[in-house]
Amino acid sequence: MTYTISAPPHKKTKLDFKTLNISKIIALIPLCLAAIYFFGIPALGIIIASVLAAVATEFGIQTIYKQKVTIADGHAATLGLMLALLIPPEAPLWIAVVGGFFAIAIGKHVFGGIGSYIFNPVLVSWVFIRNAWPSYMTPVSIPHIGQFSDLLFENGAGLMVGVSPILLIGGVYLIYKRYVDWKVPLAFLVTLVAIPQTLMFLSGVATLIHEGVLNPLMYMSQLFIFLEISPELPYAMIGAVFFGILFIATDEPTSPVTKNGRIIYGIVCGVLVFVYGYFGNYVDGVLYGIFLANCVGSYIELNTMPSSFGTMSLPEKIYRNIMDKIPSSLKFEVINNE
Amino acid sequence: MEIKKLDTLPEKIIIPLRQHRGAVCEPLVKKGDRVLVGQKIGESDEYYSSSVHSSVCGEVLAIEEAAHPDGNKVMSVVIQPEESNESVEFPKCGDITSDQLADFIKESGIVEHYGMPTHTVLRPKGKKIDTVLINATSSEWIGGTFKTPADYASQMIDALKMLIKAAGAKNGAIVLRTDDQASIDAFESIEIDGKNLQVAPLVGSRKMGYYLNEQDSNIVVLSQERIFGKKILNFFTYNVTGRKVKIGCDPTSVGVAVCGIKSAKALYDAVNEGRPFYDTVVSIEGVSDKMEYILVKIGTPFKDVIDSYGYTGEIGKIIANGVRTGVAQYTDQVPVTKGTTRISIQKPEEVIRDESIECIHCARCVDVCPVALIPSRLAVMADQGRFDECRQINIDNCIECGDCAAVCPSKIHILQLIRYAKDAIEMAYENLPEKESSNLKLGCGCGGE
C-alpha cells in the first residue's frame, strides 16, 4: 500500500485566494444590480467592458510573458468590477476598456503581479483616467445623505457605487466571516466619524472662549455636542466612502501586515480622506485619500514591526520606571519576586 | 476511564535503538537471543543517551536499519514476540538519594517526547536546575493513561516530587490547560502536605513566582492557554516563570527543566513498580468518529495499532504526532517509539493537494502567531536566503506550531521556510569561536554549550 508523504501541516484551511476574490465579487453583485436598475443598460455595458478588458489584459500579458495564466482565480475580474463601479455610467465604453487595461497592465503586472503591487490597481487606473479624461470622468452629481432613505436608495448618485450605501452590507459580511480584515475598516470609519465631531466640539469651545464665558459648566456642556451629528457627516456617509472603507482600503497587498500597522493605516486613511473631502468632495476624496495612504503603507509597516515576546513596550517601560520609584508599601501591585 | 490495551500480538516488534536526540545505543543482544519483557537491549556510555528495553518476550530476529517515525532509518532490534509474559525481575526502587534517582531515570530509559533524555534535562552538564515544570497543556495525551482523574492528579504530584528530587531543584509546577475543567477539578480535589490544592491561572504578571509566595509552598499547579509546537520550551518557560531564555539556549540555561506528562508517568511507574519505560499510550485519530486512546508496547508497528480497531478503509496518509506538525509516514511498518504521542490517519479524499501562489499579504499568519512574529515576511526572507534579516526579526522565537501555514490562503509552506532559515542560521554560527568576533553579536549568550 502506498501512502502520500508531504510536509506538515497536514490539515489546512479550505480558504484560498480564489474564494476570497469570488466572495468579493458576490458581495458587490447587489450593488451592481441596483446600479443597473438606476442607470439602465449603459451601466451594464460599463461593467461588462471593464471586467472583460481586465481579464483579457491579464490573459494577454501572462501569455506573452509565458507565465502561468491565472485568470481563473478571479483577481482580474474583481479589479475590473471595482473599477467599473467608479466610472460614471454616462462615460463612453472605451473609457472602461482603457481603465480595465490600465488597472491590470500598469497597476498590477508592472509591479510584479499578485501581492507585489504597492498601489491598489483600481486606484491607479482610476487616477489615470480621471486625470486623462476629466470631462468624461466627472460625475454629474455628488450625493449628500439628507435622510435615512437616502442610505437605501440615493437619487443624487453620480457614480454606480453611490446608488445604495446599504447594499454594501456584503462587505460587512465578509469582515464577519473573516475573509477581510476588520482592523483597517474599523479604524478608518471611526476616524472619519470622530474628526468632524471633534472639530465641531472644538469650534463650540472656541466660540465660548471668544465670547469670554467663564463658567466651566458651559464648557462641559459642549461635550453633549458629540451626540449631535455634525453637518459634515452627511457628506461623508455616502456609497463611495463605504465602498472605499470596505473594499479598497482593505485590499491586502496595499495595507500593512502588522497588527498595529493596520490600525494606524486605517487612521491615516481616515485623516487623509477627511482632509480631501472637507476641501473638495468625498467621492474624489476617498479615492485620492486611500491612494495617498497606499504611499505610506509600507513605511507604516516597517515602523510597527513587533518586538520579541516579553519585551516591554514604550508605555510599559514608562509605567515600570514610575512604579519602581514608588516605595512598595504605597502600591497595590503584583510582586513578581521569587 | 478504562485503559484500553492492545491485546493482539503483532507479527514482529521493532525497537529502535535511538529513541531521542543524542547517541544511538549499542545493542546488548544478538540475533537468535531470547529476550524477556523489560530486558535491557540497548545501552550507551554517552551521557546524552538513555537505555532501551524490550517490550515483549521473544526471539531476536535481526538487528538492522528499520524505518523510524522521524522519517529516516535507524538501527533497530527486531523481535519475534511469543505468547508469554515472562519478564526480568524488576528492581524495587526504595528510598534512594538524588544521584541514584537520576541514574535510575537513565537506566529506566525515560525520555521526553520532545527528544531529550529526561535525566539530561534534570541534570544538564554545568548548569543548575532550580525549577521543574510538567507541561500538561496538551492533555489529550492524558486520556486513557489513568483510570480516574484523581489518580492522574495524585500520581502527577508524586512524579513531580520525584523529578524535583532527581534534579535537586527547589520548586516545581504542573501547568494545566485553562479549558481542561476535568483536570483542574481533579487537582483541586486532592491535598498536598495537608493543604488543599488551588489551581492558579497564569494571567498578566502573575507568574509562577507569585503563586509560590502566595501559596507558601514549593509545588504549585498553574493553568494557561493551550500551547503547542515543536519548539515551545523557551516560550513556555517564559510564560510560566517569566524567565527569558537567551536565543540559542534551552530552558536549562535559566535553571528550568520542562518535562512532559508521559515521562512523569513513566517515572512514577518505574519507581513504584520498578518496570522500565516500555509501553506508552498513543491517541489515534481517524479510525472512528472520536479520538481513541490505546496502551501499546513500544516497538509495535503502526499497522497493528490501526488494525486493532478493525479499520479496513483505504488510507491516504499516516501521520505520526499530530496533523499540525507531525511527520507523514511512507510505510505502516514504522514502530511506536517513546516519542510517539498520536497516530493520525487520513482517507485519500482528505489528503490535501494545494499549489502555492505568491503571498497576498492578507496578514492572517500575523494574527494567529502566538509569539508575535511576521511569518509572511520571514518566509520571503528565508526564500531569498536573507537569513541575517530573519534573525533581526526574531526568527528564533518561532515555536514551530504551524498555525501560519495552516491558515495561509496562498498555501505557502511557511513552516518549512522558517525551519530552513533556522537551520541555516544554526549551522552558520555553530562553529563560531567564542568571544572572538567583534562585529557579530551572535551565538549562545548563556555561556554553556
Image: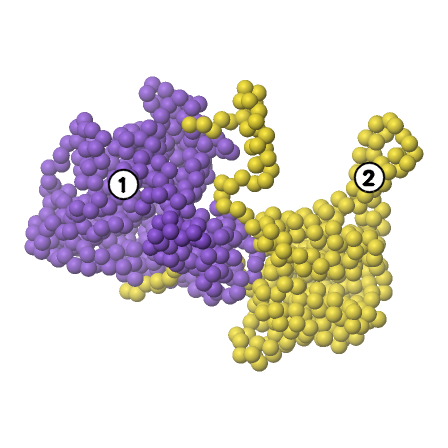
Chain colours: A yellow, B purple
Residue ID at (84%, 59%): A142
Residue carrying label 2: A201
| Residue drawn at (45%, 27%) of the image | A337
Q: Depth check: B432 or A190 in front?
A: B432
Mark 1 element type: loop
- From this viewpoint, is residue B361 visible? yes
| Horizontal arrangement in the rendering, residue B269 relative to residue A164 (left or right) | left
Residue of label 1:
B125
Which x, y percent locates residue B149? 34, 32
Q: Which is closer to the viewer, label 2 or label 1?
A: 1
Question: Could one spot residue A43 in this view of the protein?
Answer: no
Q: Which one is nearer the viewer's eye here, B314 or B60?
A: B60
Which residue is nearer to you in this view: A260 or B147?
A260
Up the image or down, A41 lies above or below A278; here it is below
Mark 2 surroundings within 10 Å by alpha-carbon count, few (fewer than 14), some (14 through 19), many (20 or more):
some
| Total residue callouts | 2
User: What residue do we see at 35% from left, 36% from top?
Assistant: B255
Q: Amino acid at mark 2?
A: Phe
Q: Could you say which quadrant of the image residue A118 lies in?
A: bottom right
Query: Seen in the image, is A232 located left or right of residue B335?
Result: right
The amino acid type of the residue labelled 1 equals Lys
User: Horizontal and vertical percent for residue B362?
Assistant: 57, 57
Quarter of the rendering occupied by the N terminus of chain A: bottom left
Determine whether, in the image, residue A262 is placed left or right of residue A10: right
Q: Position of residue B283 (x, y in %)?
A: 32, 46
